[in-house]
Amino acid sequence: MRIMISADMEGATGVTWTADVEIGTPEWQRLRPVFTGDVNACVAGLHNGGATSVLVNEAHSSQRNILLEDLDTRATMLTGKHKPLSMMQGIDQGIDGVVFLGYHTGAGVDGVLAHTYLPNQITGVWLDGVHASEGRLNAALAHEHGVPVILVTGDDLTCADAHTYAPHARTVAVKDCVSRYAAICKPPTVTAAEITEAATTAMTHAGRTEGTVTPHRIEVEFDAAHLAAATAVIPTVTQLDVRRVGFDADSMTEAMKAFKIVTAIASGATEGSYG
């Protein structure tokens, strides 16, 4: 059984505000071992449940946050940016189950550090008409390859979101959301035990099936008009309203690649404090 962990940081144990996940800050340095601990707890549980191979795909920002020197030796890690499938790189390599670790809710809803790909320029993303978090987008990509989502960790609202797109997945709430920048947090020793237990039992849902490739539509709403105008120059992307664009794709793989382009263009069009 080959399992992949897509590891984001905003939903990791103890993370509650911007500096906790911004590269180079003292807070980020302090929480890197905690984030790595969440990953190791998951690796231990997956192996307890019968996994024979675990690939950890670094999925946060620079995608160089987990401490390789402290990683469970039974796992391997894909680290670094510019991966074609980004957070889901490796999902097309014979994976039998995927874990969304340290995930968060999507842009435009409640949740600790809620966002979708960009920290604050996007106010909402819709996949086939349904409001979509990164989890929902990535789950659709996993489904295209016949890979079940077996476990999701993050705050309590992230777990509730996961039940809507991966109803059979186990969930672990490592913190309860109070606001975008506050949460009631459990200590790392407590969350590690919970993650390990959940990962062990989640392995009962692992098992690749025949994937299904279908067309998809993604719409993105920004917080400023010029970002929609900037992304609408991309072929296939249509400006739907002053702050909203949309595009269609023949597969979820192509949809996510196009979404990456949209977010990259929007990020490049952002100007300092005025966005």
Image (tube, helix red, strand yellow):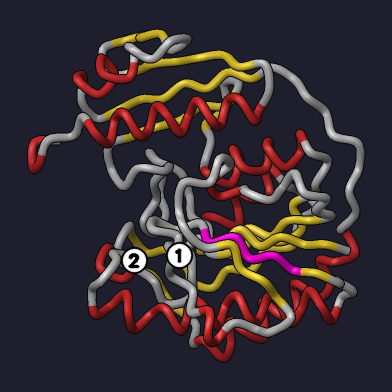
Q: Which mark sits nearer the N-terminus, 1 or 2?
A: 1
For badge 2, the amino acid type reads Val
As for residue 57 lying within the magenta part, the answer is yes
The residue at which mark 1 appears reads as 9
Boundaries of the magenta span: 54-58
Name the magenta segment's main secondary structure. strand
Q: Residue at x 48, y 79 (%)?
A: 67
Separation (CA) of disc 1 from disc 2: 7 Å
Quarter holding residue 51: bottom right
The residue at which mark 2 appears reads as 21
Quarter holding residue 209: top right
The disc at residue 92 is none
Q: Residue at x 45, y 84 (%)?
A: 33
For badge 1, the amino acid type reads Met
Side (left or right) of 259 relative to 228: right
Nearer to us in this view, 268 or 224: 268
Q: Residue at x 42, y 77 (%)?
A: 14
Where residue 182 sits: x, y (%)? Answer: 32, 67
Side (left or right) of 93 relative to 85: right
Q: Secondary structure at mark 1?
A: loop
Q: Secondary structure at mark 2?
A: loop
Q: Quadrant of the C terminus?
A: top left
Where residue 81 sits: x, y (%)? Answer: 45, 52
Where residue 237 sits: x, y (%)? Answer: 43, 12
CA neighbours of label 1 inside 10 A, class few (<14), some (14 to 19), many (20+): many
Where residue 129 sits: x, y (%)? Answer: 57, 21
As for residue 224 lying within the magenta part, the answer is no
Seen in the picture, residue 238 relative to 31 is either above or below; the reply is above
Seen in the picture, residue 8 relative to 166 is either above or below; the reply is below
Q: Residue at x 64, y 20 (%)?
A: 216
Are the residues flagged by discs 1 and 2 in contact, CB closer than 8 Å?
A: yes
Seen in the picture, residue 11 relative to 213 is either above or below; the reply is below
